[in-house]
Amino acid sequence: MIQVERLCKRFLDYERGWKSAVEDVSFDCRPGEILGLLGPNGAGKTTTLRILSTVLRPTSGRAIVAGHDVVVDPQGVRANIGYMSASTGIYDRMTAWELVEYFGRLYGMGRGPLRERMETIFDWLKMNDFRDVLGSKMSTGMKQKASIARTIVHDPPVLIFDEPTSGLDVLVARAVLQKILELRDLGKTIVFSTHSMHEVEKLCSKVAVIYKGRLRATGSPGRLLEEFDQPDLEELFFYLVERVDSGRDVAEARVGPVNANP
């Protein structure tokens, strides 16, 4: 599972001093759950996910991923996660098969088990018709499937998706979301970052709304709608944003408990 406690990340701006990208963020996500990290661009979503994947080191706070502390045992974290981002490139001179094989070897998989695993993944993602296509010749949908394949090739228990449908047409986006649901049904612990209310409603059993680096609410969608007396997630999101922008005390922005029940 993933457990995040009072996570903080500050960066030094030589003109403005130390600035917080993430401040006092806490949430958890269990096996078989999809946590939707919901917020606009620049809210702190990607910074949070980069800390969880050990790309960034937190300034303070604690994050445990699959039983491994991101600071104390980053290698243990990396061995147990798959991280996919819409901004992650595909190698132009590798075929889909070569790309996924390369990442499997990076994870230390033996050739026999790796080939067997890849055959299963290529069948599941319907990639066999372009397994020998170079990255430079792939369509956007092909590239996204190849990205999913390399993310899950080592069968990690924890998966992190950072806006994986960004820039995709509606058909490809739908296929990506369906595969994420299937991974949930396999018992994976999944964090899904997005600014799409529709995707959160479709996928997520738990929501964490982040804005200006702080967590504004967390819990099941139904519980949050009831708590804040809002008709849907879109209205809830705008309510929380306006609450912050209106200058009210941050302490009044009723953040749900870290272990909120669905």
Image (spheres, grey):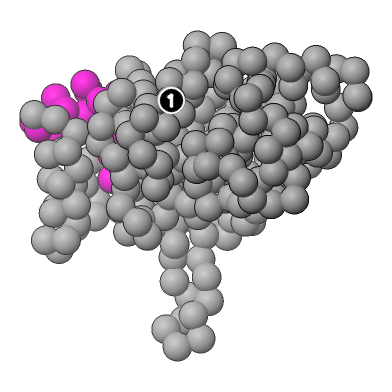
Q: Position of residue 210 (x, y in %)?
A: 33, 47
The residue stretch that appears in magenta: 216-230
Quarter residue 69 falls in: top right
**Is 252 positioned to the left or the right of 8 in the image?**
left
Q: Position of residue 34 (x, y in %)?
A: 44, 25
Q: Nearer the viewer, residue 203 or 96?
A: 96
Circle 1 sits on which residue?
Answer: 175
**Is 37 positioned to the left or the right of 161 in the image?**
left
Residue 219 seen in this snapshot: no
Q: Position of residue 138 (x, y in %)?
A: 59, 42
As drawn, 38 above or below 109: below
Residue 179 seen in this snapshot: yes
What residue appears at the point 54 percent right and 23 percent down from the top-left corner?
189
Q: Where, quadrant-wise, is the N terminus in this rendering?
A: top right
As drawn, 66 above or below 89: above
Quarter residue 98 falls in: top right
| Magenta stretch contains residue 127 | no
The residue type indicated by label 1 comes to: Ala
| Magenta stretch contains residue 222 | yes
Q: Where, quadrant-wise, is the C terminus in this rendering?
A: top left
Q: Nearer the viewer, residue 148 or 56?
A: 148
